[in-house]
């Protein structure tokens, strides 16, 4: 009966309850949407760097990433290690060789990063093959061809079919030089890739660098990038000596920090929004308690204990919070679904922004993350109970004689 | 069934007496003062009264004479500033808040001038409320309340909300609530003040009948002559002092 009483009490002042509920629903739904869009931005930022180039996990010789040392190479069979097959949610793994050199077309020269990849395995790890704006991607077995970033192509004055001269240092100390034909041009939105990255076939680069059968790294993509930290830790316990697994957070510490700062920002937004909502709930509960002073006097007179009164008021608040968070979850789900399926294209208004190693794309797109729903819903209930405690306590501490005298 | 005598079993808590020769309620040299800011108001001065079990007694007097204060003290809602109030073996002044709450829950029924029913509960739920607080299972609560509603002549109104009932019907529901837990004492503060003469007299006859049949002690406060005229014992108060205590053979 106490539960029924609490629920019915909610509807004594229907308009006030509905107004408070609507504030709770709107704040929860908008919060869920905002968190979904935040997550979408983080997703974009992470994807633009990990799925375009870095991958989520990298196996390399210890220290390779600090100096990109040409001589810190591994056998190509590293890409076939049994430990890699056991990675949960593995989307793909691919061997890579890297060199730094100079590309020249006629009188124009530009410094470049030359990445030797397996054209069959690489598309399972990165999405560079989808960013082509001219020409085509590398074909299996194709030698002496390259795809380059659009900004690099522009600086070199190269186009699809152009021949570029490549000069680099080989592993044996000699100067490696050759001709490459441009097969494709890509645009990623990341100026560092577009302005200096060139991708060619792994065997061709191995031959140029005199590193046949050798690679610098194995790049791995997984379905849940946020689990990369634990996957790397686990891999490091089973990998042979001389090979270390690094997650994207190690490779891109600025990205990891940016995501952590987004998490803080999220909590600040939650705090501000729910502070205002909490005040609304507090007001409703206080009004409701003040209006029923005489009734609480009666309940105390009939022998109800103060904790019973406190429980009654908190139950009312709990019902309000559960209704608010349920409707807020539904509203948030619909808004997130809309922003995921359709989103808002801002490319006409703003350009991509490179930040912390990733790219914030000119669009608003939400992604579904359970935490973005659970945290606002749970916090709304917590805020409501916190806001309800004060009036509940006031009601519980009433003097029954004075309360019964109230008009 | 209306009008038939239905004797509900008294709860094990109904009888408060530890000694049959002792008065049920004793107020000895009671003083009660209230503080309103810096002002001290004396509600009772050297007030003494003994009430036997099963009495039907009215505290009569003008507004501010201290009638409600006596009810509050006997009901364990308030404590005396000085003197002693005992109900059965319970010393009100020294009892803990928890003991007083339990006393109010199990041994006392309250009836108020303005009925004080909970508007969002049905009539039956209002009457069941104290039984619910006592942890009585729902079927047993409903059985007891149904019998009481028949006895009080409000059968068929169980599912109505207080707002859909007349003043007389609401007060009958309030009486059902006061009696549902089979208390030893019913305290009624101006119970007929908001009722028309006919309804008031009907209710008074009903309560007098309940007093006779159940042996429940009724203590009223009133300045209504209809109430005073139906009491066997009338205690008159003025300015917090007893100015008369008369008994008739009604």
Image: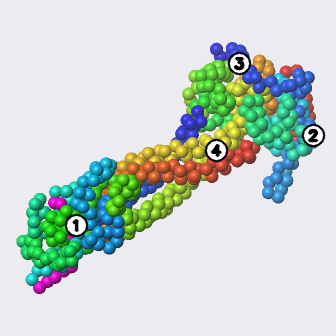
Residue that carries the numbered disc 1 in the rendered image: A97
Query: What chain is tagged by disc 4?
Result: A
Left or right position of B145 against A10: right
- Observer-nearest of B54 and A27: A27
* Labels 1, 2: one chain: no
Q: CA distance from mark 4 to mark 1?
A: 68 Å
Q: Main secondary structure of the magenta part?
A: strand
Residue B69 versus residue A157 in the image, above or below: above
Q: Nearer the viewer, mark 2 or mark 4?
A: 4
> Is A118 one of the magenta-colored residues?
yes
Q: Are marks 3 and 1 in contact (CB under 8 Å)?
A: no
Instruction: Determine whether the residue tagged by mark 3 lies in a helix, strand or loop.
Output: loop
Q: Nearer the viewer, mark 4 or mark 1?
A: 1
Residue B64 versus residue A174 in the image, above or below: above
State which region is magenta.
Answer: A107-119
Left or right position of B180 against A9: right
**Residue A250: % across, % down:** 37, 65
Residue A136 versus residue A105 in the image, above or below: above
Q: CA distance from mark 3 to mark 2?
A: 36 Å
Instruction: Determine whether the residue tagged by mark 2 lies in a helix, strand or loop.
Output: strand
């Amino acid at each position: 009966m106490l539960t029924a009483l609490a629920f019915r009490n909610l509807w004594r002042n229907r308009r006030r309850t509905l107004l408070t509920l609507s504030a709770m629903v709107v704040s929860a739904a908008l919060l869920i949407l905002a968190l979904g869009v935040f997550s979408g931005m983080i997703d974009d930022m992470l994807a633009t760097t990990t799925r375009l180039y870095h991958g989520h996990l990298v196996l390399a010789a210890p220290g390779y990433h600090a100096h990109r040392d040409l001589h810190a190479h591994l056998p190509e069979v590293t890409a076939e290690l049994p430990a890699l097959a056991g990675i949960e949610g593995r989307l793909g793994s691919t061997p890579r060789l890297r060199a730094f050199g100079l590309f020249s077309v006629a009188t124009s020269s530009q410094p470049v990063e030359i990445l030797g990849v397996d054209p069959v395995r690489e598309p399972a790890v990165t999405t560079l093959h989808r960013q082509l704006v001219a020409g085509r991607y590398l074909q299996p077995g194709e030698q002496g061809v390259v795809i380059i970033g659009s900004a690099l192509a522009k600086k070199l004055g190269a186009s699809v079919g152009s021949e570029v001269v490549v000069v680099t240092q080989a592993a044996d100390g000699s100067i490696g030089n050759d001709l490459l034909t441009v097969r494709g041009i890509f645009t990623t939105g990341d100026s560092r890739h577009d302005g200096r990255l060139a991708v060619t076939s792994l065997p061709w680069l191995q031959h140029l660098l005199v590193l046949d059968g050798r690679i610098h790294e194995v790049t791995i993509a997984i379905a849940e990038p946020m689990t990369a930290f634990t996957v790397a830790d686990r891999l490091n316990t089973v990998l042979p000596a001389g090979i270390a697994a690094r997650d994207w957070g190690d490779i891109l510490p600025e990205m990891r920090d940016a995501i952590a700062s987004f998490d803080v920002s999220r909590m600040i937004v939650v705090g501000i929004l729910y502070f205002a909502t909490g005040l609304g709930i507090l007001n409703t509960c206080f009004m409701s308690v003040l209006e029923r002073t005489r009734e609480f006097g009666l309940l105390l007179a009939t022998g109800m204990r103060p904790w019973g009164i406190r429980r009654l008021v908190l139950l009312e608040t709990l019902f309000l919070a559960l209704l608010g968070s349920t409707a807020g979850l539904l509203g948030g789900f619909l808004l997130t679904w809309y922003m995921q399926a359709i989103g808002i294209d801002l490319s006409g208004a703003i350009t991509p922004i490179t930040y912390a190693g990733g790219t914030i794309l000119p669009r608003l797109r939400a992604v579904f993350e359970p935490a973005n729903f659970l945290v606002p819903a749970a916090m709304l209930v917590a805020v409501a109970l916190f806001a309800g405690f004060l009036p509940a306590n006031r009601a519980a501490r009433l003097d029954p004689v004075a309360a019964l005298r109230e008009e | 069934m209306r009008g038939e005598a239905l004797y509900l079993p008294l709860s094990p808590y109904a009888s408060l007496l530890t000694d049959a020769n002792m008065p049920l309620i004793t107020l000895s040299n009671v003083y009660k003062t209230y503080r309103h800011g810096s002002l001290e108001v004396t509600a009772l001065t050297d007030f003494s009264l003994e009430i036997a079990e099963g009495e039907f007694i009215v505290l009569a007097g003008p507004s501010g004479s201290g009638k409600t204060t006596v009810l509050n003290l006997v009901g364990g809602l308030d404590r005396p500033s000085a003197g002693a109030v005992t109900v059965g073996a319970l010393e009100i002044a020294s009892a803990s808040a928890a003991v007083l709450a339990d006393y109010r829950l199990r041994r006392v029924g309250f009836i108020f001038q303005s009925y004080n029913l909970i508007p969002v509960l049905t009539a039956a739920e209002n009457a069941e409320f104290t039984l619910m607080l006592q942890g009585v299972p729902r079927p047993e609560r409903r059985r007891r309340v149904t019998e009481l509603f028949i006895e009080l002549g409000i059968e068929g109104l169980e599912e109505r909300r207080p707002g859909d009932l007349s003043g007389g019907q609401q007060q009958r529901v309030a009486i059902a609530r006061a009696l549902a837990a089979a208390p030893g004492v019913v305290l009624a503060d101006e119970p007929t003040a908001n009722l028309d003469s006919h309804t008031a007299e009907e209710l008074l006859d009903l309560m007098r009948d309940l007093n006779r049949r159940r042996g429940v002690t009724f203590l009223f406060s009133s300045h209504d002559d209809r109430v005073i005229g139906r009491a066997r014992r009338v205690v008159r108060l003025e300015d917090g002092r007893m100015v008369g205590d008369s008994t008739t053979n009604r």
